[in-house]
Amino acid sequence: MLIEFSFDFSITENVCRCLKYSIRALSKSFSPYLKTVLQRLIQEFEGQHNPSYVFVLECCFEEFGDEEQCVGILQEAFNYLVTKLDQVLDEHSLVEDPQLANDYFSLCRSVLNFNQTVFFACPLEKLIQTTLRAIGVQTDRTADTHCRFFENLLRSAQEHQGEEIVKHLMQYLH
């Protein structure tokens, strides 16, 4: 259905909701399907930047983020989205597509909370550029999600790899 109706955000959103509920209901029993589902979502996201795909990945992190056998595909999917959304979420699209930005920063916050190893192994420079670019976005929901993520990022920087994050922040701010 994702392929056949990829052009229709309403249908893909409902399919993604079904995936989300399946992942949560089946829990660990869903893990054999995780790689196939994430590869399909990444492939579909390449053509349609549907925020529902980002939301499903967040659900996967919440459910499988601490499972060693799932970390590889989760890392691959997260790295892809960090890189892709650095290109997609410019100043204009942050305002025009607040749902995509909101789901992205919510995903980043979940990854940071559920698996810091995966988070700090992503292309941090791209993630920080996108995060800083979103400062000042006036949509309330996105601004709230963005600020909560940014606060968590700065707190984690103190505990984990603070020097690297601060270095990237300072490079981008200069």
Image (cartoon, rainbow, N blue to C red):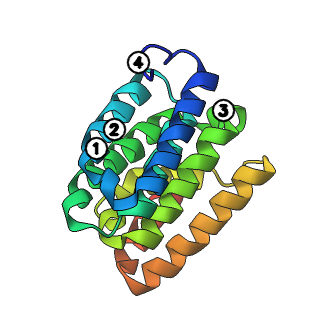
Give the numbered dot on residue 3: 4
Q: Is residue 95 above or below residue 111?
A: above
Q: Nearer the viewer, residue 65 or 108?
A: 65
Residue 96 in picture, x, y percent from top left? 70, 31
Kind of residue indicated by mark 2: Val
Most distant residue in the bottom direction: 159
Relative height, residue 113 to residue 9 (above, below): below
Q: Secondary structure at mark 3?
A: helix
Q: Which mark is residue 110?
A: none
138 lies left or right of 61: right
Q: Marks 3 and 2, how far apart in space?
A: 30 Å
Query: How many C-alpha atoms fall within 10 Å of the one at disc 1: few (<14), some, or many (≥20)?
Result: few
Q: Nearer the viewer, residue 168 or 126?
A: 126
Q: Residue at x 59, y 32 (%)?
A: 14
**Mark 2 — residue?**
37
| Residue behind mark 3 | 92
Neighbor class of circle 3 (other Cα within 10 Å; few <14, some 14-19, many 20+) is few
